[in-house]
Image: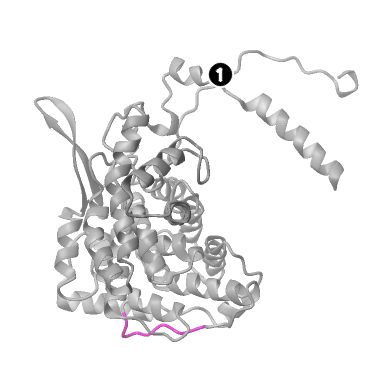
Amino acid sequence: MKKNELLLNDYAQLCREADCLEPEMFDKYEVQRGLRDKNGNGVVTGLTNISRIDAFEMVDGVKTPCEGKLWYRGYDCIELVKGFRQTGFGFEEISYLLLFGRLPDVGQLKQFRDILAANRTLPTNFTRDVIMKAPSNDIMNSLTRSVLTLASYDRNCSDTTIENVLRQCIRLIGVFPMLAVYAYHAYNHYQNDESMYIHRPSEELSTAENLLMMLRPNKEYTELEAKVLDIALVLHMEHGGGNNSTFTTRVVTSSGSDTYSVIAAALSSLKGPKHGGANIKVVEMMRDIENNVSDWEDEEAVRAYLKKILNREAFDRKGLIYGMGHAVYSLSDPRAQVFKGFVEMLASAKGRQKDFALYSMIERMAPKVIAEKARIYKGVSANVDFYSGFVYSMLEIPLEMFTPIFAIARIVGWSAHRIEELINMDKIIRPAYKSVMQKQEEYVALEDR
């Protein structure tokens, strides 16, 4: 075994030598790393009518940072949240909007809720034979495995007509909470030696209510808890075609692949710590700050520790204040702005005002600390991940479930983008790479090397 490990180390070094490209090459050939230029602008790779992000505006012909806005099918997401919170839960209503391009009336919403409720079922023995076998502490891997296995139960798995794909997408939207929660309980039972709970979803409850009910041993939750989770799901539901997992959805869709493979690919993208795992890093960072700053109300002490984090002297020594900044937004992330008020209400109900005060202080202070350290081409502000992890912790949702909850929300956006790509697709998405090989080798026979 040790010999093999040594060989792997040698092989890894060969990879580094063979694959390392000089950073100057990207400038020389005008290649935008990460498909973004030095100003953070993304390469346009497609068109979409599903959502839009506003982070800049033209002022006297100059591109100028502005307060962020997120639009779902032409509706300001903040206005949508204000609207549905007065009447109930929004996940189902906004899912209808993203999928079908219009807000439902009362009858249409009831019909859609009934369809989702009817799809909250799994094949016979699926929980036992698939989810409970080889449970993992990585719930995203379990979720991906379950999605791929569901393909085996679908006789029309490879049919890419819009009607069939829509059926598949609605089914996945319905079962995602079950797949994720059951995977967590299986892991918690078999690896942590805790009790096993498999609560069946209720047709009468919303997605957020079912999620909390299935996750908690006693099935109990408050209306405030369910409504705050519902808002979190809506705010994470969609975010333009340019985020990594949604772009993955469209790339794999363009190849003609089936819905289960497409969504599995999107899940694999989302689970990365640079994408869906960001809120976990926020919670871990905040715990580290709480453990190392004795007085959470001492702004100078908090500022000094943030500088240590930024200087790679504290926390994970990556030099990042997690939850701050966004690839697109400049002055503000509208999702964080609308979410913060509900976070404060939940913190008050949970007796976590001191924690909320620390979050608020860091939200205000971190952009200034970052600006002192680095040249910033656009504004830095708290993003939605800064508060979502705090909310999940107040809801007693385990860390292992943070990214799966993101997936439970984002499956709606992925579905909308898959359908839009299928309707408009005429070519496979195939980006170009510039070869920078510098020499041509002559083949040498094996015995002569």
Which residue is found at the position 42% from the left and 39% from the top?
Answer: 429
Nearer to us in this view, 204 or 318? 318
Please tell me whether residue 262 is drawn above or below residue 247 in the rendered image: below
Q: Position of residue 260 (x, y in %)?
A: 49, 61
The furthest residue to the left: 60
Q: Nearer the viewer, residue 425 or 240?
A: 240
The local secondary structure at tag 1 comes to loop
Query: Farthest residue in the right direction?
Result: 447
Q: Magenta includes 101?
A: no
- Residue 286 vertical position relative to residue 408 in the rendered view, above or below: above
Where residue 308 sits, quadrant-wise, is top left
In the rendered image, residue 324, in percent from the top left (x then y), is placed at 35, 44
Q: How many marks?
A: 1
The kind of secondary structure the magenta stretch mainly shows is: loop
Q: Nearer the viewer, residue 199 or 260?
A: 199
Q: Position of residue 217 (x, y in %)?
A: 48, 83
Color theme of the render = one colour
Instruction: Identify residue type, mark 1.
Output: Val
Q: Confirm whether residue 259 shows in the render.
A: yes
Left or right relative to 307: residue 87: left
Q: Is residue 200 magenta?
A: yes
Q: Which residues are magenta?
A: 198-205
Which quarter of the image is occupied by the C terminus?
top right
Q: Label 1: which residue?
A: 436
Q: Position of residue 351 (x, y in %)?
A: 32, 72
Dot 1 alpha-carbon crowd within 10 angstroms: few under 14, some 14 to 19, many 20 or more? few
Between 352 and 341, which is closer to the camera in this rendering? 352
- Is residue 410 visible in the rendered image? The answer is no
